[in-house]
Each structure stands twice: as structure tokens, then as C-alpha cells.
Image (cartoon, grey):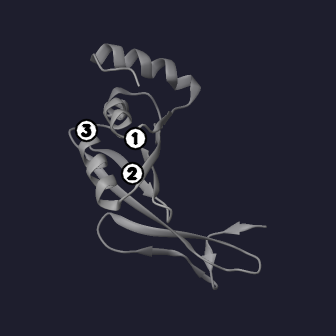
């Protein structure tokens, strides 16, 4: 079965306004359906980092680069009625990992980071006086 981002011959990415949009993936075969992913995006101060919350139609979610937006993430999860299953860091810089421990503690989600950045992430947490996640 081949996956493609189309449904009924049309791309299945539908902007719904603001910083939230839906994206669908359909599977070719006997059923051509579109599962909806809600993607919430923020620019998080003070460094203007991109933070993304992706929620599927089962209400399971991942967050990419919590940065210093832990309160935004936890509030959005509550509003969406979603369960966070993974915290994904694109790299281990302090401005990207700052909210990891708070989000993990509030949600019990797994933390994922590339193994080459895991060491840097631990060092940055210690330097910032943050709890290890």
C-alpha cells in the first residue's frame, strides 16, 4: 500500500485560519479516506522559537520543541482533549529544551531527541539548573 497526501484527487491539506491547520493522509486502495491531523503552531518568546503540537483523530499528540511554551502546550492539550505521547526535540539547545521537564511531568509523555544531542541536552539542563527529564 502506498501512502500519499491526496484524497479524491485533491491535496488533503486544509487551512482553517490562524496558526492551526489540518493535514490529511490517505491510503490508496479500496478505501480512499482522509485522517485529519490538527497542527497548532506558536512562536514562543523570548527567542521566537517555533513550537508545534500535532494531534491526530484519536486525540493522541506529539509536541515538537516545547521551548519556553510549556503552559501553552498544557493548556492546548486540555482544550483539544488530547493525550501527549511524545515530546520531540529537534536539538539540545537550551531554548528548545527548557520546557521539557514541566511538560513531561504534567503529561508523562516520552522524551525523544537524537542520541548525539542527548548529551548536550543533559549538559544544558544542568547549566540552567533544570530538572532532568
Position of 132 relative to 70 (above/below): above
Secondary structure category for the residue under label 3? loop
Spatial separation of the CA atoms under disc 1 and disc 3: 12 Å
Using the rendered view, name the quadrant where residue 101 is placed.
Answer: top left
Which residue corresponds to mark 1? 65
- Label 3 neighbourhood size at 10 Å, few (<14), some (14-19), many (20+)? few
From what the image shows, is residue 48 above or below residue 101? Answer: below
Instruction: Tell me: 25 left or right of 98.
Output: right
Cβ atoms under marks 2 and 1 closer than 8 Å: yes
SS category of the residue bearing label 2: strand
Q: Which mark is residue 47?
A: 3
| In the displayed structure image, the side of residue 104 where residue 56 appears, left or right | right
Query: Is 112 positioned to the left or the right of 82 in the image?
Result: right
Which image quarter is the C terminus in?
top left
Residue nearer the viewer, 64 or 87? 87
Q: Position of residue 14 (x, y in %)?
A: 45, 75
Q: Quadrant of residue 46?
A: top left
Residue 52: mark: 2
Outermost residue, bottom side: 8
Amino acid at each position: 500500500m502506498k501512502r500519499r497526501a491526496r484524497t479524491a484527487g485533491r491535496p488533503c491539506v486544509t487551512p482553517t485560519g490562524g496558526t492551526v491547520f489540518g493535514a490529511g493522509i490517505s491510503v490508496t486502495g479500496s478505501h480512499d479516506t482522509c485522517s485529519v491531523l490538527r497542527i497548532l503552531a506558536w512562536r514562543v518568546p523570548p527567542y521566537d522559537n517555533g513550537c508545534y503540537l500535532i494531534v491526530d483523530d484519536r486525540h493522541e499528540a506529539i509536541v515538537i520543541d516545547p521551548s519556553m511554551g510549556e503552559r501553552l502546550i498544557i493548556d492546548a492539550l486540555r482544550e483539544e482533549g488530547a493525550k501527549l505521547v511524545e515530546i520531540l526535540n529537534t536539538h539540545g539547545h537550551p531554548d528548545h529544551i527548557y520546557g521539557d521537564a514541566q511538560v513531561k511531568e504534567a503529561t508523562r509523555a516520552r522524551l525523544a531527541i537524537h542520541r548525539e544531542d542527548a548529551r548536550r541536552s543533559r549538559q544544558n539542563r544542568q547549566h540552567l539548573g533544570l530538572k532532568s527529564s
